């Protein structure tokens, strides 16, 4: 099994450009998450989807939108990229949303906005 | 304020030596504590998870301890190997919300030299 996959692995954008980060999981998990990781900081939750058809804001949602396309796929969209969105983005999934359930992370997308 | 603090920020040890990483947290109400290993350019991978009633949990050469009274945890690595070079992240989750929010430490960057 591939687990959690993310595309692309690297991306460079100019300020104001838009793009969508893709995430897919093959573990039949109900819940999926998007995090960002900045140097010297812990991972921060951007958005999550507790189940297919639902999405909710996390700690740092401004400037982002998400779509839970189906049970397997959860995408993150930057409508107008800003340099402050330069970061490494991780997608994760868990069987069920909740503190007791393990989250499995993808390999990350390294995004640079110039 | 819910926080997770890790120390040291970075650590260099020689192959074969032992080391201990520290984690202090103020997250309340406490649900569980995880240690993740994050290799460079990869997503975090879970090493151990401990609930309130567990004091010690081992995973091979990794042993985590938890003192819920003092809100401290440690990760002990025995007989280190070059492949242990990574960032080790302490993650504490709460029961204060349906999602069970995860609070991530900034990580300890461990380098093992031959």
Image (tube, coloured by chain):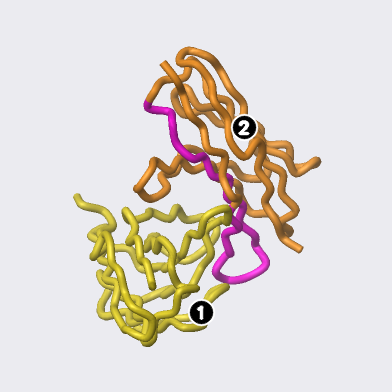
Chain colours: A yellow, B orange
Residue placed furthest toward the right: B70
Q: Give how far across and how far down residue A8 sits, in percent.
A: 24, 65
Q: Is residue A90 left or right of residue A57?
A: left
Judging from the image, what secondary structure is the residue with disc 1 in? loop
Quarter occupied by residue A55: bottom left
Q: Chain of mark 2?
A: B
The range drawn in magenta is B83-104
Q: Give how far across and how far down residue A74 sits, in percent.
A: 31, 73
Q: Is residue B6 left or right of residue A81?
A: right
Q: CA distance from mark 1 to mark 2?
A: 32 Å
Crowding at dot 1, Cα within 10 Å, few <14 / some 14-19 / many 20+, comes out as some
Crowding at dot 2, Cα within 10 Å, few <14 / some 14-19 / many 20+, comes out as many
Q: Give how far across and how far down residue A37 sits, in percent.
A: 48, 59
**Is residue B84 one of those drawn in magenta?**
yes
Q: Is residue B85 above or below residue A30?
A: above
Q: Are marks 1 and 2 on the same chain?
A: no
Quadrant occupied by the N terminus of chain B: bottom right
Q: Is residue A10 above or below residue B67?
A: below
Residue placed furthest toward the left: A1
Considering depth in this image, is B57 or A24 the residue closer to the camera?
A24
Q: Which residue is mark 2?
A: B21
**Is residue A53 one of those drawn in magenta?**
no
Judging from the image, what secondary structure is the residue with disc 2 in? strand
Question: Which residue occupies 45% across, 15% down?
Answer: B15
Q: Give how far across and how far down residue B77 sits, in percent.
A: 53, 24
Quarter occupied by residue A34: bottom left
Q: Chain of mark 1?
A: A
Q: Is residue B71 left or right of residue B13?
A: right
Q: Which residue is mark 1?
A: A61
Considering depth in this image, is A109 or B65 the residue closer to the camera?
A109
Residue placed furthest toward the front: A114
């Amino acid at each position: 099994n591939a687990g959690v996959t993310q595309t692309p692995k690297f991306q460079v954008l100019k300020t104001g450009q838009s793009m969508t980060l893709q995430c897919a999981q093959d573990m039949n998990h109900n819940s999926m998450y998007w995090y960002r990781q900045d140097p010297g900081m812990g991972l921060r939750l951007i958005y999550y989807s507790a189940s297919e058809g639902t999405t909710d804001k996390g700690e740092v949602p401004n400037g982002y939108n998400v779509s839970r396309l189906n049970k397997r796929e959860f995408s993150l969209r930057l409508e107008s990229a800003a340099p402050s969105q330069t970061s490494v983005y991780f997608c994760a999934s868990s069987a069920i949303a909740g503190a007791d359930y393990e989250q499995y992370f993808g390999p990350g997308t390294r995004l640079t906005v110039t | 304020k819910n926080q997770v603090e890790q120390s040291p920020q970075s650590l260099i040890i020689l192959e074969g030596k032992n080391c201990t990483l520290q984690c202090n947290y103020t997250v309340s109400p406490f649900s569980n504590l995880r240690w993740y290993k994050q290799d460079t350019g990869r997503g975090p991978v879970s090493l151990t998870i401990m609930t309130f009633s567990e004091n010690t949990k081992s995973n091979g050469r990794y042993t985590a301890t938890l003192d819920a009274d003092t809100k401290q945890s440690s990760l002990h690595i025995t007989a280190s190997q070059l492949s242990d070079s990574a960032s080790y992240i302490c993650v504490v989750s709460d029961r204060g919300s349906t999602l069970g929010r995860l609070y991530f430490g900034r990580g300890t960057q461990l380098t093992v030299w031959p």
